[in-house]
Image (cartoon, helix red, strand yellow):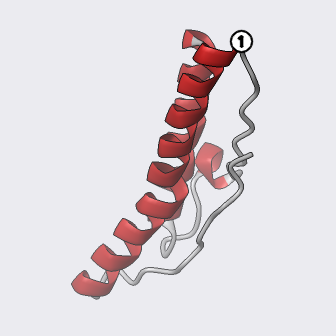
């Protein structure tokens, strides 16, 4: 179960803070889940299957506030990743 997440606001007027919040959000909300899913799929391939549960957010479907578009992008990516894994494996 991938349930980790960070929901930090990012002011688009502050370039450094926006970049830092975006990088952190993508690293925790998407890249970490992708890494764990990769390990799980490889394990399942060797051991006969299994289940992955990725907890996303309604933000991944509809977007979020102007201060959280990086969060919505990461969760939308998680939804697409989950569908891709389900189709492929």
Q: Reply above or below: 33 against 64.
A: above
Determine whether the residue tagged by mark 1 lies in a helix, strand or loop: loop
Q: Is residue 9 left or right of residue 17?
A: right
The residue under the point 42% across, 70% down is: 24
Question: How busy is the neighbourhood of tag 1: few (under 14 within 10 Å), some, or many (20 plus)?
Answer: few
The answer to whether residue 81 is visible is: yes
Q: Reply above or below: 74 against 42.
A: below
The answer to whether residue 69 is visible is: no
**In the rendered picture of this protein, how many numbered marks are placed on residues?**
1
In-front residue for pair 62/79: 79
Residue where numbered disc 1 is placed: 48
In-front residue for pair 44/86: 44
Q: Image quadrant for the N terminus?
A: top right
The residue under the point 71% across, 12% down is: 48
Q: Is residue 12 left or right of residue 86?
A: left
* Residue 82 in the image, given as x and y percentages of width and height: 60, 30
* Residue 59 in the image, given as x and y percentages of width and height: 63, 54
In-front residue for pair 52/24: 52
Give residue 50's quadrant in the image: top right
Name the residue furthest front: 47
* Residue 57 in the image, given as x and y percentages of width and height: 69, 52
Q: Image quadrant for the C terminus?
A: top right
Q: Reply above or below: 21 against 44.
A: below
The residue under the point 60% across, 48% down is: 60
* Residue 55 in the image, given as x and y percentages of width and height: 72, 48
The residue under the point 43% across, 80% down is: 10
């Amino acid at each position: 179960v991938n349930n980790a997440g960070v929901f930090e606001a990012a002011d688009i007027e502050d370039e450094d803070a926006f970049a830092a919040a975006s990088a952190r959000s993508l690293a925790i909300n998407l890249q970490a889940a992708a890494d764990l899913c990769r390990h799980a799929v490889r394990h399942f391939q060797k051991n006969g299957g299994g289940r992955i549960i990725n907890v996303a957010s309604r933000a991944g479907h509809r977007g979020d506030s102007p201060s959280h578009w990086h969060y919505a992008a990461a969760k939308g990516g998680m939804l697409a990743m989950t569908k891709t894994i389900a189709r492929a494996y």
